[in-house]
Amino acid sequence: MTPADWIEHRRADGELLGWMRADGEGFRVFDLLGRERTSPDAEGPMDWLEAEELLEDLGMGYLADRWTLRLPDGSERPVRIAEAGADGITVVADEFGAASAVGANPERFRLPFPVSGELVPR
């Protein structure tokens, strides 16, 4: 569940791209996984238009990337994101691209929102 003070930002077609949160005179940006994406080079929060532009530029393509899931026992699994939303993130095991195979029934893992360090880009 997103915090009450997060403001949705959607594309022109209505698809959710992420959220902005007021911080003093500016805004912080969060992606669909709940990770803060405000530029680390920024001296502080961004203005409204910069925050919107960042989310537009970020888009949703990163959701299709390959990821690594770090399991509690310390092992790692290659995964792909199947679903992402404020109610949680579902990833599927993707050893050797198996998640994309027709008829595959890959192992699924449900992660809390916002996602933390257990899910990292490959």
Image (cartoon, rainbow, N blue to C red):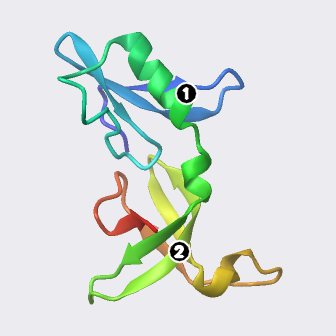
Q: Residue at x 29, y 20 (%)?
A: 27
Left or right: 116 as drawn, with respect to 52:
left
**Location of residue 47 by image quarter:** top left
Q: Secondary structure at mark 1?
A: helix
Q: Residue at x 37, y 26 (%)?
A: 20
Q: Residue at x 81, y 83 (%)?
A: 103
- Residue 46 picture location, percent across and down: 30, 18
Q: Quadrant of the N terminus?
A: top left
Marks 1 and 2 close (CB-CB < 8 Å): no
Residue type indicated by callout 2: Val
**Location of residue 23 by image quarter:** top left
Residue type indicated by callout 1: Glu
> Mark 1 packing: few (<14 Cα in 10 Å), some, or many (20+)?
some
3D distance between C-alphas at marks 1 and 2: 25 Å
Left or right: 35 as drawn, with respect to 89:
left
Mark with earlier residue (1, 2): 1
Which residue is identified by label 1?
56
Q: Secondary structure at mark 2?
A: strand
> Mark 2 packing: few (<14 Cα in 10 Å), some, or many (20+)?
many
Q: Is residue 89 above or below residue 22?
A: below
Which residue is identified by label 2?
79
**Location of residue 96 by image quarter:** bottom right
Q: Residue at x 59, y 86 (%)?
A: 95
Left or right: 51 as drawn, with respect to 14:
left
Front in this rendered view, residue 13 or 95: 95
Left or right: 17 as drawn, with respect to 51:
right
- Residue 56 picture location, percent across and down: 55, 27
